[in-house]
Image (cartoon, rainbow, N blue to C red):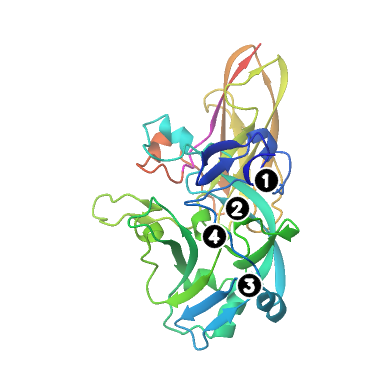
C-alpha cells in the first residue's frame, strides 16, 4: 500500500503536498472509484483534525450564526447520499504540454478525476437553519490547510454563488464510499459541489460564510482563473466543468497484439447535463463510430464508454469525442484550449498505439 492508503501503482506527482492519480486501467474498472484509487489533489500539507474537537462555524450574512460539531450535523439535519465525480481543473494537462510547455504546473494525465458515493447533509439545509440573508450573493468555504504556493501563504478559501450553494445536490459530506472520510480526502467534513471544478469542493471544512462578494482568497482571486485576454483584465474564474472525454485503456503508446482491441474511457458533462453520445475515429477524424455509453450513476457522475476496434498492424491513432445533452461538443485540438496554467483541457483525446 502506498502513501495515504493509496494503491502502490498510483502516479504520484508530488509527495508534499500529496498529489496523485490512478493509472487508467485501475480507474476504468468500476463506475464508483475505490477510495484507495481515488485521485488526490492537495495544495499544502494534509491537516490532522480530531473529529471530537472539530467544529464548523457558519457565519457572515446569516440571522443565526452556528457552531456545529459532527454529531450536531448528523443529528439535526437529514442525511443524503449522492454518487459524484470530482475533477481537478488541471485534469489532462499533460496533453496541453505537447502544444507548449506549462511551467510549474502538475502534468496530470486523464486520471485527475474519480467518482465516489458521498454521504452528508445538504448545505442548503444548514444555511436555511442559519437564516441566510437575502443580500448574501455568495457562500465562501474555508479550511485550515495552508499552501506555500499562495501569495501570501494563507488558509484555503473559495466561494460559490448563492444559487449554487442552495442547490439540493451540494453536500457537507462526512462519509465516502460507506466509510468516514479519510484524512487525505478532507476528514472530518468536506464540501461536494457536483459539476464544478474540484477546487470548489473544499476539504477539511471549518467555516461557511455568507457574503456579498465572491471570496477574495488567493485560490479564487488569483489561482484557478483563465488568464486575461483582450478587454478582460481579470480573466475568467473557473467554476462549472466543460464537457470532457478521455481514453483510459489501452494506455497511450501501448504495443498490442494483432486482433480486436477494446478501448474504454469516460465522459463527463458537468453541471446539469448528461453525455448524449461518444464517438471514436481511427482515420484522423474522417469517419466515426459510436461507442457504447453507460448511464450515469447519478446527476453529478461520469459516464463510462467502450468500443472494440479491429486495427491493422502498424502504428494506429485513436480519437474520441463527445456531445452533451445541450448539444455542445468538444474542441478538436488541444491548441484551441491551451492556456499558461494548463486548465480545463477538454479537447479530443488522442491515443497512439502500435499493433504487431
Mark 3 and mark 2 lie on one chain; the one further toward the N terminus is: 3
The alpha-carbon separation of the residues under discs 2 and 1 comes to 9 Å
Regarding mark 4 in the picture, which secondary structure is present there? loop
Q: Earlier in the sequence, mark 4 or mark 1?
A: 1
Task: Compare residues 318 and 129 and report the one nearer the observer.
Answer: 129
Tell which of 272 and 134 is nearer to you: 134
Residue of label 4: 201
Q: Residue 346 in the image: x percent, y percent? A: 49, 42
For the residue pair 350 and 250, the one nearer the viewer reads as 250
Q: Mark 2 near mark 1, Cβ–Cβ under 8 Å?
A: yes
Q: Main secondary structure of the magenta part?
A: loop
Which residue position holds label 2? 184
**Residue bounds of the magenta highlight:** 345-351
> Where in the figure is residue 303, as x and y percent of width and height?
66, 47
Residue 290 in sight from this viewpoint: no
- How many C-alpha atoms fall within 10 Å of the one at disc 2: few (<14), some, or many (≥20)? many
Q: CA distance from mark 2 to mark 4?
A: 13 Å
Residue, disc 1: 5
Relative horizontal placement of residue 303, taking residue 270 as reference (left or right): right
Which residue is labeled 3 in the image? 122
Looking at marks 2 and 4 on the same chain, the residue that comes earlier in the sequence is marked by 2
Amino acid at each position: 500500500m502506498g502513501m495515504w492508503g493509496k494503491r502502490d501503482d498510483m502516479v504520484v506527482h508530488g509527495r508534499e503536498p500529496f498529489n496523485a492519480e490512478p493509472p487508467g486501467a485501475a480507474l476504468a474498472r468500476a463506475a464508483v472509484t475505490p477510495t484507495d484509487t481515488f485521485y488526490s489533489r492537495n495544495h499544502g500539507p494534509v491537516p490532522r483534525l480530531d473529529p471530537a474537537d472539530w467544529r464548523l462555524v457558519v457565519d457572515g450574512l446569516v440571522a443565526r450564526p452556528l457552531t456545529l460539531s459532527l454529531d450536531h450535523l448528523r443529528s439535526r439535519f437529514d442525511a443524503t447520499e449522492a454518487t459524484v465525480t470530482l475533477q481537478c481543473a488541471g485534469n489532462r494537462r499533460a496533453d496541453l504540454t505537447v502544444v507548449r510547455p506549462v511551467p510549474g504546473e502538475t502534468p496530470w494525465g486523464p486520471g485527475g478525476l474519480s467518482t465516489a458515493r458521498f454521504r452528508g447533509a445538504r448545505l442548503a439545509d444548514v444555511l436555511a437553519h442559519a437564516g441566510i440573508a437575502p443580500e448574501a450573493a455568495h457562500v465562501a468555504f474555508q479550511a485550515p490547510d495552508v499552501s506555500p504556493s499562495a501569495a501570501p501563504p494563507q488558509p484555503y478559501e473559495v466561494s460559490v454563488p448563492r444559487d449554487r450553494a442552495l442547490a439540493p445536490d451540494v453536500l457537507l459530506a462526512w462519509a465516502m464510499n460507506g466509510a468516514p472520510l479519510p484524512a487525505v480526502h478532507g476528514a472530518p467534513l468536506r464540501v461536494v459541489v457536483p459539476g464544478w471544478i474540484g477546487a470548489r469542493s473544499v476539504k477539511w471544512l471549518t467555516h461557511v460564510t455568507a457574503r456579498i462578494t465572491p471570496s477574495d482568497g488567493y485560490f479564487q482571486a488569483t489561482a484557478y482563473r483563465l488568464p486575461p485576454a483582450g478587454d478582460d483584465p481579470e480573466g475568467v474564474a473557473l467554476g462549472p466543468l466543460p464537457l470532457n472525454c478521455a481514453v483510459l485503456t489501452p494506455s497511450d503508446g501501448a504495443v498490442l497484439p494483432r486482433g480486436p482491441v477494446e478501448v474504454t474511457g469516460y465522459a463527463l458533462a458537468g453541471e446539469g447535463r448528461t453525455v448524449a453520445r461518444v464517438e471514436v475515429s481511427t482515420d484522423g477524424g474522417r469517419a466515426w463510430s459510436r461507442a457504447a455509453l453507460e448511464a450515469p450513476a447519478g446527476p453529478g457522475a461520469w459516464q463510462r464508454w467502450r468500443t472494440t476496434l479491429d486495427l491493422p498492424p502498424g502504428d494506429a491513432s485513436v480519437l474520441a469525442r463527445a456531445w452533451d445533452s445541450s448539444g455542445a461538443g468538444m474542441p478538436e485540438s488541444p491548441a484551441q484550449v491551451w492556456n499558461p496554467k494548463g486548465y480545463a483541457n477538454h479537447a479530443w483525446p488522442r491515443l497512439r498505439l502500435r499493433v504487431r
